[in-house]
Amino acid sequence: MPLSSRLTPLSEQNTTAEQQRVLAEIQSGPRGNLDGPFLAWIHSPALADHAQRLGAFCRYGTRLELRLTELAILTTAAWWRSQAEWQIHEPIARQTGLPDQVIEALRQGRVPVFATPEEACVHAIGVALYDTRRVPEELYQQGVALFGEAGMVELIGVYGYYSLVAMTLNAFAVDRGGDAPLPFAE
């Protein structure tokens, strides 16, 4: 899909060698494309370089099941009402096994009925972070019991990284184009 944003479009004629290096690294990595925030971040190649490495870890390298990572990403996209983030990750979430009714409840801003305690905990942690900017002790202990301390650190990293993604996509009006209706009312 053709991406657009409010930033100056880049081409071979107006990109620096550093931008081209980072673009090549992103495209040769596990993502294989510039979908999402990279269209904006590449205007600052140092930010793009660091952010894409963190993003690759948060998406592909944590000890969390991919289904749980995608749940955290959709929870974030729904909270930020990030059209592009949702459009990118909704099909991925389905592929990882997140049920349609969970996805639709998230999109509508409702608390889904979850099949596992891990799913419920991941969502509750995200909601707590976004609503209160804290994780209550009991919920924290539940997360540690389910994911371990390192898993909790990684989960919070996923939430933080994808908040950065959502803010970037929203601030720079990144649009994926296409005919599909937007997931959230503008």
Image (cartoon, rainbow, N blue to C red):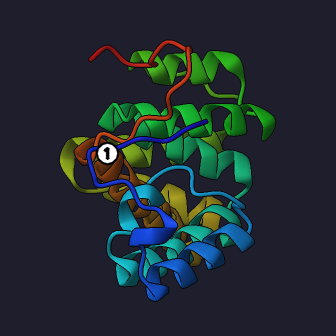
Q: Residue at x 53, y 79 (%)?
A: 20
Give, as a three-letter code, the residue at label 1: Ala
Q: Which residue is mark 1?
A: 128
Q: Vertically, is 35 above or below 108?
A: below
- Number of numbered discs present? 1
Depth order, front residue of 145/5: 5
Taking the view exactly as shown, the residue that stands out farthest to the front is 13
Q: Nearer the viewer, residue 102 or 18?
A: 18
Quadrant where the N terminus lies?
A: top right
Does 107 sit left or right of 109 as displayed?
Answer: right
Residue with the most extreme left position:
132
Asked if one can make out residue 91 in the rendered structure from this viewpoint, the answer is yes
Residue 17: image x %, image y %?
A: 48, 87
Q: Is residue 2 left or right of residue 65?
A: left
Secondary structure of the residue carrying numbered label 1: helix
Q: Could you tell me which residue is drawn at 63 percent across and 28 percent down?
A: 114
